Image: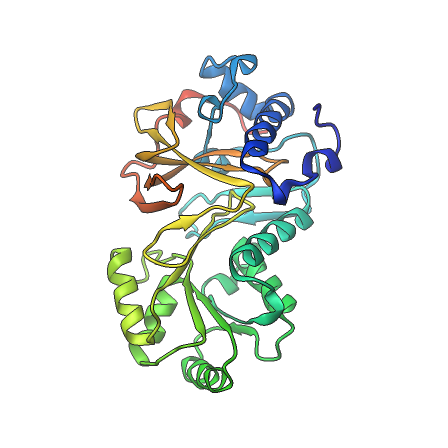
Amino acid sequence: MNPSSDSILTEGLFSLSETAFTTRALEIFRFQYAQNTLYRQYTDTLGVDPSAVQSLERIPFLPVGFFKTHPVRSTDFTPEVVFESSGTTAVVTSRHEVKQLDLYRRSHTAAFELFYGSIKDWCIIGLLPAYLERSNSSLVLMVDDLIRASGHSDSGFYLYEHEALYNLLQRLEQRGQKTLLIGVTFALLDFAEKYSMQLEHTVVMETGGMKGRRKEITRAELHSFLTDRLGVPAIHAEYGMTELLSQAYSKGKGLFTCPPWMRVLVRKEDDPLDVTGRGEGIINVIDLANIWSCSFIATEDVGTIHADGRFEVAGRVDNSDIRGCSLLVATPT
């Protein structure tokens, strides 16, 4: 297949079989090598011959740091929206130029309903105080879409109105309403420190995000505290980032599952081309929804991929200037 149009590239994207995933990934790799100048330069610098790439493990993964220094575009386009990562004014943030916002909406909707069923069955509550201050947050846009799609009168965002949130959760519990409380880590901790509850119909989902607001704790410590205080059997989690258009979800113990159009591999820290589909290493993500930027991202997250394909994240690489970014110095365009 020669990807040459939006419809060909996205056809059947959100219902790929395991065998179709590899075929589509290789097609998108060749498309992006041809249409993404930065990715082509990086691939050439690594000495990779695109015609020799016949497996997922042989595909070059672009270091995520390039989103901080260069436009990452496949084809030339005017972005419909630009997502930016969080950070202080002293920190260079990532910018993800999104050609088609609808593609992101289709991706996050399909993933949510794959793992949790129809959005209309849920009341969606977003506890994202810091992120609500940013109009270019992909997380806020996703949760806002879920709130709107739920159609529930009590769905909405909360800043620091903890008492109002506590009262609302109590009312929803009394009605037996399926509820998703999705929040950044520090905000969930702040709420759980003030209120102890016994939630039977509510899923509590953390999206990460301490950002220096509190003392860092391990995921196990975080989940133990939240399950004890909020009375839920497990803490769910979402794995996503500004540079991706797809998310993986965990329903407990920090074990994430990817939707069919997303895949995680791991690489060795000292060799960007030493990639495998199992074991420990630094996480590489294949996100086939990233058609118009780059679908093959070398993250800075350390993790483990288990035999059943689920993965967990242990933390970040100590030196974020990982080997790979330094291999190519290109002038931003």
| Front residue (pair 58, 291) | 58
| Front residue (pair 226, 40) | 226
Tell me, yes or no, if residue 129 can be seen here.
Answer: no
Q: Position of residue 241 (x, y in %)?
A: 47, 47
Q: Position of residue 240 (x, y in %)?
A: 47, 49
Q: Position of residue 153 (x, y in %)?
A: 62, 79
Instruction: Give the number of callouts.
Output: 0
- Location of the N terminus by quadrant is top right
The picture quadrant where one finds residue 316 is top left
| Front residue (pair 109, 62) | 109
**Left or right for 97, reference 131:** right
- Location of the C terminus by quadrant is top right
* Picture layout, residue 242 above or below residue 203: above
* Picture layout, residue 166 above or below residue 298: below
**Left or right for 193, reference 17:** left
The picture quadrant where one finds residue 32 is top right
* Picture layout, residue 290 above or below residue 190: above
Tell me, yes or no, if residue 52 can be seen here.
Answer: yes
**Which residue lies at the image location 48% right of the left edge and 86% below the top edge?**
171
Q: Position of residue 246 (x, y in %)?
A: 54, 47
The picture quadrant where one finds residue 63 is top left
**Which residue lies at the image location 31% right of the left edge and 69% below the top edge?**
226
Q: Name the image colouring.
A: rainbow
**Which residue lies at the image location 70% right of the left edge and 27% below the top edge?**
3
